[in-house]
Amino acid sequence: MAELPITSVLPSLFTALKSSNQVILQAPPGAGKSTLLPLKLLQEKIFSGRILMLEPRRLAARNIATFMASQLQQKVGEDVGYRMRGDTKVSKSTRLEVVTEGILTRMIQQDPELSDYDLIIFDEFHERSLNADIGLAFALEVQQGLRDDLKLLVMSATLDSEGLQKMLPDAKLLTAEGRCFPVSYSYHPMNLQHRTIKQALTGAIVATVKLALQQQGGNILVFLPGVSEIKRCQQQLQELVNAHLQVLPLYGQLTQQQQQAAINPIAKGLRKIVLATNIAETSLTIDGISVVIDSGLERRVSFSPRSGVSRLQTKRISQASATQRAGRAGRLQIGHCYRLWREEDHSRLDAQIEPEIITADLTSTCLELKVWGVNSFAELALLDQPSVANVQYAEALLTDLGALNAGNCSKHGQALAEFGMSPRLAHMLLTAKDWERERPGISWLACRLIALLEGSERLPLDLDFALQQMASGQFEQAQRQAQQWAQRFGFVKSSSQCRNTNTYTGLLLALAYPDRIAQRRDNTGRGQAGHGQDVLYMLSNGLGVKLMNDASLTSAELLVVADLSLTEQGADAMVYNACAIDLVELQTWLPQLFSQQAFVQWDLKAQKLIAEQRQCLGKLVLSRKVLTDITPAQKQTAVLAGIRKAGLSVLPWNDQSKALLTRLRCAHLWLPELGFVDYSDEALMADLDKWLLPYLTGVTGPAQMKKIPIIEALLSRLAWSLQKRLDSELPTHFTVPTGSKIKLRYSDNAAPSLPVRIQEMFGQANKPTVANGRVPIVIELLSPAQRPLQITQDLLGFWNGSYAEVKKEMKGRYPKHYWPDNPLEAMPTRRVKKHM
């Protein structure tokens, strides 16, 4: 192997590994940390036991292991091997294993001491994959509790060294320089006028590729957000393909042969354009790349606990990812990077990618924690804690699957974890095994179904039809995987078709996806979809979904959905894989999914009480029966729930009750020491069952609703002494010098106002107040025609100042009314002059 920059730091690294159990290595792309470093560790024979290296991506893991084996002039599986789900190449002689996809946590669960291993390497830790975070946390527990001699090496190109050092305070920190040739940059922002990024991307990529072919030599690596964009660009670039130029895709779902075609060296004199996802950001060196075209976009998975579905969203990359991508052009020679955004926008990108632990579905991870004996993520050493909502969803689903009992891992949960697959599918497989005696062949059917669902082959919408195709010889990859599952668990491979295969398939899917049983919604008023309309269903978790109108399952009343995708707009999700299911079979074999509920609720639209006995499947209502024997307490509770949902505005407010509410809020604000309670909307809603519930007796419709005594209900929250204090400190009326009692206007967060004719305030010099003198009243002085003349809180200043101008103007307009020269000494009056 050629000399790489990591060589200079190897002596210090070897010393650190001998003296410390924890080492952090920061080395930029191209330094050789993923390939040369592990090989040197083998050659120096620093460790007598095996070395385990965790890679976040399958493609990188396989290629790194293959490359290192070739450097030793061996085949993969001899000194260097790899482990990943469905593909393992190791032997008794293997000393270095490259693993991925949660394999490390499975190995720790099976052998907590990791008896055969002396060193665990966490490569590309900056990608912050969920498996890397959890794997490191488990490894730290092993090191601290069982193996104080176990060595941990965390390394990456762009590393959150500060955060890692806080988590690993005793770790030695080393930094290696990279070998990166100079990379120049040019910015070519997409033209988004009247177009979305999705519409503009393909044209921008094609134009930039043509420009790069003219301006630069060498091979071109194009970073695109996803497979669909790669396929569109590949189709548009076909016109450029000739004897000297190839266009090759690179993404995870391709076969190993197709992936290697993009990675391996190309014949001399030829050029290639590699269209890749962010799978090519790290760990892979694609031969001859000197040009990078970066779309600045990537697909990120974001899990929604409300819907129980992960959504792939197209988002801007981070600055760290942009640096990684550009660095691919400078691995082997001077390079150039074309960026499809404005130069001034680069600083607006996030510094680092959001860790997967914050956005991912945590169901499998939660099960791993429970099996390990950890009750919560907070007990583990993690750089970031996950979303509380995501954890709650995961624990609820595991409870529904029988994996958890009162928050603790059950025997069934331990058995599910041993499968090393999604808990949903493991539950399906274990239950199928239990059903095998009564339903021969169902275990083999479960193996085939899981193989289809876990495979990368494109499936038809109807999974029962896909199984029939599989039986006829299609989906070879899934067939091989099904045979491996059957052999592993000793299931009988039945060549004969099970009776009513459709029912079996639906039942198996319902085991795995009890929250995705779908009931047809009537979206046309006739129970049939209209021409060109999608057919709508509702999942048992409450999520709306749709099928294309030409789908084979649109006549089914009940479906079980295995795969679906949320739209960017957040509307009904699109179903990709499903199967019809019979309600009677579902009730017979999975009665635990159903419940009988007494439903008593206030219907907000109809303004009436609904009382029904409902048969429910999750949030689906399968049947209704009118209830006649509901208690008064049930009625009151139902009306209260309706009010709580609709808000306080549905109560029969009038001017008097609104005015009282405002005074009560002012008292809480202005007189805190007296103990006036909070009357904000939030406080009233939180305390609804105490102050309003007693006044809902007999309320079953609009007529009774209007009779709710709101004033009495509001005052019930105050002691009698405070009610009296309210009237004295914040009176409803103020007595003016004429003796008239005029209503005060209170408002939230403002002093009360007193609208009064100017003649009734003659002789008043002091400032009138409320709230024990703390809040001055705003005086709105009115003309004889009740029009505003002056608004003031300083009557004395008004009489001595601007009153003269007001009198001068008003005296001519209202000559019958009293306009004295000295209002301070004048007699207040409600009458015109001749009646005074």
Image (cartoon, grey):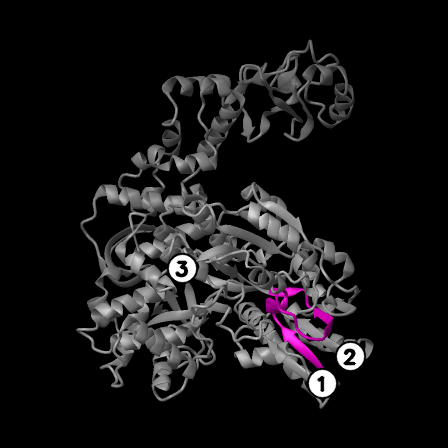
Mark found first going from the N terminus, 2 or 3: 3
| Disc assigned to residue 735 | none
The boundaries of the magenta stretch are: 270-298
Query: Circle 3 is placed at which residue position?
Result: 106
Amino acid type of the residue tagged 1 in the rendering? Leu
Residue 477 location, x and y as percent?
43, 80
Query: Circle 2 is placed at which residue position?
Result: 213
Contact (Cβ within 8 Å) of mark 2 with mark 1? yes
Residue 659 location, x and y as percent?
49, 31
Viewer-proximal residue, 682 or 759? Answer: 682
Q: CA distance from mark 2 to mark 1?
A: 10 Å
Query: Circle 1 is placed at which residue position?
Result: 245
Residue 114 location, x and y as percent?
42, 55
Residue 680 location, x and y as percent?
48, 33
Indicate whether residue 285 is drawn in magenta: yes
> From the viewer's perspective, is the residue at label 3 or at label 1 nearer?
3
**Mark 2 Cα shell of 10 Å, populated few (<14), some (14-19), many (≥20):** some
Amino acid type of the residue tagged 3 in the rendering? Arg
Q: Residue at x 66, y 17 (%)?
A: 833
Amino acid type of the residue tagged 2 in the rendering? Leu
Indicate whether residue 81 is drawn in magenta: no
> From the viewer's perspective, is the residue at label 2 or at label 3 nearer?
3
Q: CA distance from mark 2 to mark 3?
A: 47 Å
Mark found first going from the N terminus, 2 or 1: 2
Q: Residue at x 54, y 57 (%)?
A: 121
Q: In the rendered view of the protein, which quadrant contains the N terminus?
A: bottom right
